[in-house]
C-alpha cells in the first residue's frame, strides 16, 4: 500500500501536502511529546493501532515488492525493485522497534490489520510488470498520503517517526521512467494503466475507511475524541488533498486521472 521529507509533484508527497504542519493551539497534542500525550489511555491505544497498521502495511509492501521483482524484464529492474523492497523493510523495523519501546507487542498490534490488508492486496493483485510498478507508485502513495495527514495531528515523537517511515523511497523516478517509456512504445498501454490506477485509488480509499471503522480507538481519535482530530469539513478537505496528489502522480506518469 510505499512517503515526506522533500516531496515533489511526482513523488509520494506533493508540494501541496501538509508536510510542514506542526503548529497547533496551546495545549493541543501537536505541541506535546509522547511522554505527555500518552498519559491519555485513549490516545495511547489509538497510536498503538496506528503504528500497528502502518507496520503491517510496510511489511506487506516489502513482501509484495520482493515478489513483484520476479516479473522484472531485466536484472537492473529486478535490482531496483529489490532496493525499494529493502527500504520498506527498514521502515517496518523502525515501527516494530517503536511499538516495543512504548511497551506494546508489535505483532499483536499488527494482527487486527492482517485481514483487511490481505483483502486489499487480493483485490489489487497486478497482472504484469507495469501494473506492479503503478501499484507501487500510485497505490502505496495514496495510503502514505492518508497516514501523513494523520501524522500532522499527533504528538511530536510519533509525528517525526511516521514522517520518517513515509519518506520517499526512490519509487518516483524509476517508476515514471519505466511507465512513460512503455507508453511511448505502445500508447495503448496508457489507457489500460489509467484504468488500473483509478481502481487502485478507489480500493485504497475504501480500505483506509474500513481499517478506521473497525478500530474504535483509531476512529475516536480521527474524529476528535482524542488528539486534534478531523471534523467533517476537514475530512472532506483531506480527501480533496489526497485526490489532488493522486492526479499529479497520474500526470507525472503520463496517464489520464
Image: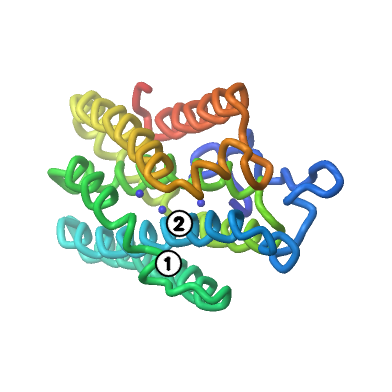
- Numbered circle sitting on residue 50: none
Q: Which residue is painted at 53% across and 24% down in the image?
A: 240
| Closer to the camera in the image, 52 or 190 | 52
86 to the left or right of 99: left
Badge 2 marks a residue whose secondary structure is loop
Badge 1: residue crowd in 10 Å (few <14, some 14–19, many ≥20): many
Q: Which residue is painted at 71% across and 59% down in the image?
A: 37
- Which of pointers 2 and 1 indicates the residue nearer the eye? 1
| Closer to the camera in the image, 44 or 185 | 44
User: Picture quarter containing residue 85?
Assistant: bottom left
Quick one: which residue is furthest to the left in this view? 127
Quick one: which residue is furthest to the front in this view? 41
153 to the left or right of 184: right
How far across and how far down the image is residue 9, in percent?
54, 37
| Closer to the camera in the image, 79 or 212 | 212
163 to the left or right of 196: right
User: Which residue is labeled 2 in the image?
Assistant: 170
User: Which residue is labeled 1 in the image?
Assistant: 87
| Closer to the camera in the image, 203 or 83 | 203
How far across and how far down the image is residue 187, in percent?
22, 26
Camera sees residue 11: no
Q: Are marks 2 and 1 in contact (CB under 8 Å)?
A: yes
Amino acid at each position: 500500500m510505499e512517503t515526506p521529507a522533500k516531496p515533489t509533484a511526482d513523488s509520494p508527497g506533493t508540494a501541496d501536502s501538509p508536510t510542514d504542519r506542526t503548529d497547533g493551539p496551546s495545549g493541543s497534542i501537536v505541541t506535546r511529546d509522547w511522554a505527555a500525550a500518552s498519559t491519555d489511555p485513549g490516545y495511547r491505544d489509538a497510536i498503538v493501532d496506528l503504528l500497528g497498521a502502518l507496520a503491517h502495511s510496510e511489511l506487506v509492501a516489502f513482501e509484495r515488492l520482493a515478489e513483484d521483482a520476479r516479473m522484472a524484464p531485466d536484472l537492473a529492474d529486478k535490482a531496483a525493485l529489490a532496493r525499494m523492497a529493502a527500504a520498506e523493510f527498514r521502515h517496518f523495523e523502525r515501527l516494530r522497534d517503536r511499538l516495543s519501546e512504548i511497551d506494546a507487542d508489535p505483532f499483536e498490534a499488527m494482527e487486527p490489520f492482517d485481514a483487511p490488508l490481505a483483502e486489499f492486496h487480493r483485490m489489487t493483485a497486478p497482472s504484469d510488470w507495469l501494473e506492479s510498478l503503478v501499484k507501487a507508485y500510485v497505490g502505496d502513495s495514496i495510503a502514505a498520503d492518508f497516514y501523513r495527514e494523520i501524522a500532522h495531528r499527533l504528538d511530536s515523537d510519533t509525528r517525526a517517526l511516521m514522517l520518517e517511515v513515509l519518506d520517499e523511497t526512490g519509487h518516483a523516478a524509476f517508476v515514471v521512467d519505466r511507465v512513460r517509456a512503455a507508453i511511448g512504445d505502445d500508447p495503448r498501454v496508457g489507457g489500460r494503466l489509467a484504468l488500473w490506477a483509478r481502481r487502485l485509488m478507489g480500493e485504497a480509499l475504501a480500505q483506509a475507511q474500513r481499517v478506521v471503522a473497525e478500530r474504535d480507538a483509531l476512529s475516536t481519535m480521527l474524529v476528535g475524541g482524542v488528539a486534534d482530530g478531523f471534523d467533517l469539513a476537514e475530512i472532506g478537505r483531506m480527501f480533496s488533498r489526497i485526490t489532488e496528489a493522486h492526479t499529479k502522480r497520474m500526470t507525472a506518469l503520463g496517464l489520464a486521472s
